[in-house]
């Protein structure tokens, strides 16, 4: 699936157009709120658009599982379908907006997704935006996502943007002025690896620079990172956009420049073409003071208009102009969403209670603050869906017997609010009445998220309010199916010991409830695998601000996790017989069809790491030989090209 | 439906039990958190329980339409079913709690409902807790509600409490220290009338005293109101409870006493048996200082234990002990709820667009901040339901064709939040794509409610954020079905002029979306009528704190309302031929069955007022003679008995 996009063709058009602009006009186009230039027939354009797991902030759109959950699917083919559905909806929106002359924020065709930073520390609030802790898994999921967004036509379907380049991964509180200092080895083998591989495999239109400094240079003002590494060594031809406010941070937080004019000059001279924020409002002053040349301004402007031409914005033969609005939240996209949600959930323990036998006399108690909550379907950077199926609702719709519900406690406030139905005693009561308890606990996007919104976690334990309820439910002696809803690892050791089953379901999207019920009642067998290590305690990992990978993630962690990276149970036993290093004979020894991910690890520089995987669908009883290799990944050592 | 309850039988048991108590033990029982007296076998009991429109704050329970919406049904038979369902759920909860030895707040059998204050001013934040602005409608709805709660068995099923006695109806901000000064005529003909009639017709177990003073005396410390009027003149034999904190307010807000001890003494000596709040913590001191007698303490204590005996709390033959927990949120209660929700909605305008023809090619745009909101299903003093059907969801489930959804704007914040899907342009866009727009706007319980929670309204206009969206949608020229979600009157004059249909749906309960869809697509024809006047402007009504009825409610308002009290359209034309003053021949001239409320007004002291109504179900084409009279109401002049 190679794009037939001819960048030089569009670049030539861009050069001709930009050549007609005054210097002021060119400068005006380098900010995310690019104004119209009526005399040249250029409409206004707003470059700020989001689509992390569905078109976001643009009114109603399908909300797919949060990125971390999609990573757990290990299903690159399904990820491609998801991303194609997202770009369909994005184009449908754009077409409709354009019909009415709209050019506002969140109505454009370039998207500031995906987030492919490594989820190197379980505390990181934005970790759930990523594809987890492994560079290879991250790369594969991102390649599919970028390809699905960008399409393979004459024009770009929509632009994908790899972010945050580079190394960025918390702590949130100090992100604006933080200097990340990874070792050369970690920079190459961990922090830069996915960016490089995805660039080579999927040709993303854009990169977004991170807030932090990297080895002393701010990532939106680093000639070494942007010009030397990304453009010259790696061959990137697209445009580079600053994270929002990152140019201003250079003087206000990093203190590497002494004023805003210098910051703007540093950004543009370093190769940062487009500014989200207000920093490039000082570009004209920088130009007048001789700090930036017209040539540099022209170069960035051409890059941005190359992208706009490539998106078909000035063409009348763009194949995507015909995508109708009815694509948005279509039944087809809902079906893809449900399938992705099923595969995003990871079965961590099962004493045999699952799948539940869906008998009319089976009494089920669904309990917990995440059972009927909508915001845990979403995660952050989410759209608004026209129909949500909460975990509770999905179980109610599927269950043949009586379903009791009690919220039981607040997600984090230790004082239950009776007005909001929070009553631990009532919860214990229905647990006693039931044959099985489905306990829906964990976190939500108000507890873990971006700075200013939720921030980082400070513990791997669930909030105390939930521990109290959990303890009360355990006291009933009823079998518990523990459904952990979170975008990151929590300490599940008590649940591993005391619950009948444990299911990690991340933030599963608008169809989350249907997907959960599909798994609980066995309509579908679980097939997800953990994209991150589930540690026992923060005592087991290094300090958050330490960017050394030593002791972090499954590749470098020396301790015993509660559940390791790659872990995930199924209802059907699948036998793996390796015939040689890259060939495995799989046999589904169960009675229903089973999706199965084969993971192949390799030893590289003394570290065991994932180097290939394949997910296949096996009929009951089916045996199949599967080749598990990725030669391009193996070849992508980029030893001399990697940095600087 | 007369209760077979023998109050004297229970009173005798109470007297015997109370006789065994020490003075300290008796005093301890006069607060809402009554402690156990183990030596006498008395368990602890918490008197604070709520059930305004469903068991509230006790975990999960069926949430029926808010009281104001149930009043709009004018259906006393259905109200009886609703209240019976509520008391079933209350008993089911209680039985289950008791099994586990629970005696906490919101787990008891006496309920501080209904609120039968008159909704005399459209600003009052708590107005949606009431049955509207008419004393007769209020009385009839309350009689059914009380009977449904209390049952007609040997024991009380649960206790109902009439509140807030008396006159109480805002402003919220000054309620704790306010002195209401109605004219003698308004006191009799408006403020006290429903309390008296419901007492006579339904024998409620309890009254709750209001926060305000009435003609100078605090309502929880008024010998004239409680002893002279309620007990002696009206013959009330039950118990009287203070609103929460009202005893303390006597010294802290009303300044009619100089300290807490005096307040406690004034309350008890006035006949207020039970204290919600901390005021009666000073009763022991008042007794020691000789401010209250043991006889008075004993009398109140006996009243409270009479109630507990009557509720069967100390018996082993109570018929309600067998109500199983599965009653809570049963399918049967859900069906009653849906029917009440259908009848609680009032069709105010219909140019013929309704019912919508449910064709597969009909494109519907559902737009507005109340379309997919759960809190507008609830109103205040609500429980937590196990399954909510939002207005949007109900329409989606019922529609054969495509349903577009956009939230469009915030309920009140003028800045739309894209993160929450608030995008006016997207809303306008789907309106343009649709054949019909269903616009769900209005208020929510965070905008109108109790002091400390939401407070009073200051305008009859919808929030400016919604006006902007409304204007944008009108600009599309598409036919609009305007669904006004509010617990009180708003100025709907623009919608009356410019929308194709206008539907008032109050806060319609957990089944609200199903009910709305039932009406929109014509599965059921609307049959609700307005329980309050819909004014054009606050300029048309007197100042809020003025308790004169002059110029207020349909009985005294001289202006032209946008929609009058009692107004409500149907899909089927029904002909009313009055054969004499009390007999009407009804003919359903339409093609589907139609519920129809006949209203009979009378002129009394120069004022036209409702004096009887009947709601009947008419088959298509059916003619039926109906008698519309209420002799007991007509006889209930209580001229000399009314006060003081």
Image (cartoon, coloured by chain):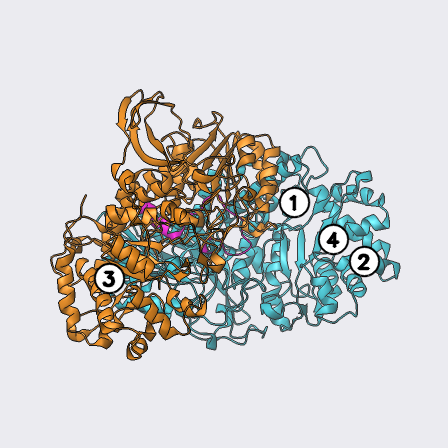
Chain colours: A orange, B cyan
Q: Where is residue A236 in the image (x, y as percent from the top left)?
A: 24, 55
Q: Where is residue A244 in the image (x, y as percent from the top left)?
A: 37, 63
Q: Mark 4 = which residue?
A: B31
Q: Where is residue A504 in the image (x, y as percent from the top left)?
A: 45, 38
Q: Does label 3 lie on the same chain as label 1?
A: no
Q: Mark 2 = which residue?
A: B283
Whether residue B379 is in magenta: the answer is yes
Q: What element carries label 2?
A: helix
Q: Which callout, 1 or 4, points at the residue further toward the start of the chain? A: 4
Q: What residue do we see at 37% from left, 69% from top?
A: B467
The CA distance from mark 2 to mark 1 is 24 Å
Q: Residues within 10 Å of mark 4 (few under 14, many from 20)?
A: many
Nearer to me, A377 or B466? A377
Q: What residue do we see at 31% from left, 59% from top?
A: A226
Pinpoint the chain carrying mark 1.
B
Q: Give the range drawn in magenta.
A: B376-401
The CA distance from mark 3 to mark 2 is 70 Å
Q: Mark 3 = which residue?
A: A97
């Amino acid at each position: 699936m190679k794009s037939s996009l001819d960048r030089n063709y569009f670049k030539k058009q861009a050069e001709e157009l930009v050549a007609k602009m005054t210097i002021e006009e060119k400068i005006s186009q380098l900010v995310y709120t690019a104004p119209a230039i009526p005399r040249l027939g250029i409409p206004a354009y707003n470059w700020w658009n989001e689509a992390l797991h569905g078109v976001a902030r643009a009114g109603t759109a399908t909300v797919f599982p949060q990125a971390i959950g999609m990573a757990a699917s290990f299903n690159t083919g399904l990820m491609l379908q998801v991303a194609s559905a997202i770009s369909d909806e994005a184009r449908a929106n754009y077409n409709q907006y354009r019909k009415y002359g709209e050019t506002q924020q969140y109505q454009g065709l370039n998207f500031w997704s995906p987030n492919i930073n490594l989820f190197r520390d379980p505390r990181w609030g934005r970790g759930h935006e990523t594809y987890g802790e492994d560079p290879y898994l991250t790369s594969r999921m991102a390649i599919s996502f970028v390809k699905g967004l960008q399409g393979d036509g004459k024009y770009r379907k929509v632009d994908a943007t790899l972010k945050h380049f580079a190394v960025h991964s918390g702590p949130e509180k100090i992100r604006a002025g933080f200097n990340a200092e990874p070792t050369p080895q970690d920079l190459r083998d961990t922090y830069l690896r996915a960016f490089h591989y995805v660039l080579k495999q999927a040709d993303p239109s854009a990169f977004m620079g991170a807030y932090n400094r990297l080895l002393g240079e701010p990532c939106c003002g680093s000639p070494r990172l942007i010009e030397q590494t990304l453009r010259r060594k790696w061959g990137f031809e697209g445009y580079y956009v600053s994270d929002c406010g990152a140019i201003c941070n250079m003087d206000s937080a990093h203190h590497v420049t002494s004023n805003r004019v210098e910051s703007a000059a540093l950004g543009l001279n370093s190769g940062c073409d487009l500014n989200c924020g207000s920093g490039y409002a000082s570009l004209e002053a920088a130009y007048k003071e001789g700090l930036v040349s017209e040539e540099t301004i022209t170069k960035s402007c051409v890059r941005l208009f190359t992208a706009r031409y490539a998106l078909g914005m000035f063409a009348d033969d763009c194949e995507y102009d015909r995508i109708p609005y009815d694509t948005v939240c279509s039944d087809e996209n809902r079906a893809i969403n449900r399938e992705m949600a099923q595969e995003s959930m990871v079965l961590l323990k099962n004493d045999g209670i699952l799948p539940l036998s869906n008998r009319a006399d089976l009494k089920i108690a669904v309990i917990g603050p995440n059972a009927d909550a909508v915001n845990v379907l979403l995660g952050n950077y989410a759209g608004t869906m026209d129909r949500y199926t909460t975990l509770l609702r999905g179980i109610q719709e599927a269950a043949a017997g009586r379903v009791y519900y009690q919220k039981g406690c607040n997600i984090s406030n230790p004082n239950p609010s009776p007005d909001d139905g929070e009553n631990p005693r009532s919860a214990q009561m229905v647990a006693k009445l039931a044959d099985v308890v489905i306990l829906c606990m964990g976190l939500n996007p108000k507890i873990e998220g971006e700075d200013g919104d939720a921030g980082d976690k400070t513990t791997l334990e669930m909030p105390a309010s939930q521990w109290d309820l959990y303890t009360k439910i355990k006291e009933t002696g009823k079998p518990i199916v523990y459904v952990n809803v979170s975008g990151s690892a929590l300490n599940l050791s008590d649940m591993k010991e005391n619950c009948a089953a444990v299911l990690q379901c991340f933030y599963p999207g608008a169809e989350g409830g249907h997907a959960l019920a599909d798994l609980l009642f066995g309509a579908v067998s679980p097939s997800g695998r953990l994209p991150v290590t589930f540690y026992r305690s923060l005592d087991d990992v290094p300090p958050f601000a330490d960017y050394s990978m030593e002791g972090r993630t499954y590749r470098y962690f020396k301790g015993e996790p509660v559940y390791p990276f790659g872990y995930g149970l199924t209802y059907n036993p699948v036998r793996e017989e390796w015939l040689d290093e890259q060939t495995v004979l799989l046999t589904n020894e169960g009675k229903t069809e089973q999706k199965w991910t084969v993971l192949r690890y390799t030893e590289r520089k003394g570290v065991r790491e994932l180097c290939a995987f394949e997910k296949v669908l096996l009929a009951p009883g089916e045996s199949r030989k599967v080749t598990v290799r990725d030669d391009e990944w193996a070849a992508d050592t980029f030893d001399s090209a990697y940095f600087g």
